[in-house]
Amino acid sequence: MTPPAPLAPAVRPPHGAATERCCSFDVAAHPRSASEARRLTRERLAGWPVCADTREAADLVVSELVTNAIVHTTSRRITCELRSVREGECLRIAVRDEGHSGSGPHPGEGRPAEEHGRGLLLVAALSTAWGALEAETGTGLTVWAELPARPSHDLGSGA
């Protein structure tokens, strides 16, 4: 599977097309930064045309990806990007670090009693697609996930 570039430059939509939105923010690579990233994600998505389930899923996905960047890299700064793509049908989340461990991200096989190792399993369960791209400079990794702006299925709300 060849993933779309998560941090591509913004392209002006054709006249009459839905406006695509994009914003990014940086957080320090610090244990408290996951909660800061969740707060910033909620603030940025407040005016976007995405449903409440997608906003909640985005909070969780951003938190997990930022936590992974903190735990598994030597980064001092982490960049998060939120982008409305495919004429607003999809929300793409991208988290870029400054240097990773050498192996790409892979979902863990969390055992029932373990507290760690389930982050990417959650990302995979909540997203329609996800992946990782090496930085063109050779330093850093971008992990991205796509969520439907208006899901056609239950995102785990128990309905």
Image (cartoon, rainbow, N blue to C red):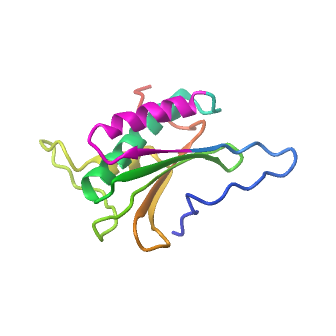
**Rendered residue at 30%/57% (across/down):** 107
**Rendered residue at 84%/52% (across/down):** 14
Q: Is residue 155 shown to the viewer in this render?
A: no
How many numbered discs, if any? 0
Relative side of 135 to 121, left or right: right
User: The C terminus appears in which quarter of the rendering?
Assistant: top left
Relative side of 18 to 90, left or right: right
Relative side of 15 to 48, left or right: right
Asked whether 111 or 25 is in front, the reply is 25
**Residue 28 spot, x, y in % from top left:** 36, 45
**Rendered residue at 79%/51% (across/down):** 13
**Residue 38 spot, x, y in % from top left:** 41, 34
**Residue 127 spot, x, y in % from top left:** 47, 47
Q: Is residue 112 shown to the viewer in this render?
A: yes
**Is 36 within the magenta?**
yes
Magenta residues, as a range? 24-46
Asked whether 11 or 130 is in front, the reply is 11
**Is 25 within the magenta?**
yes
Asked whether 63 or 131 is in front, the reply is 63
Relative side of 89 to 129, left or right: right
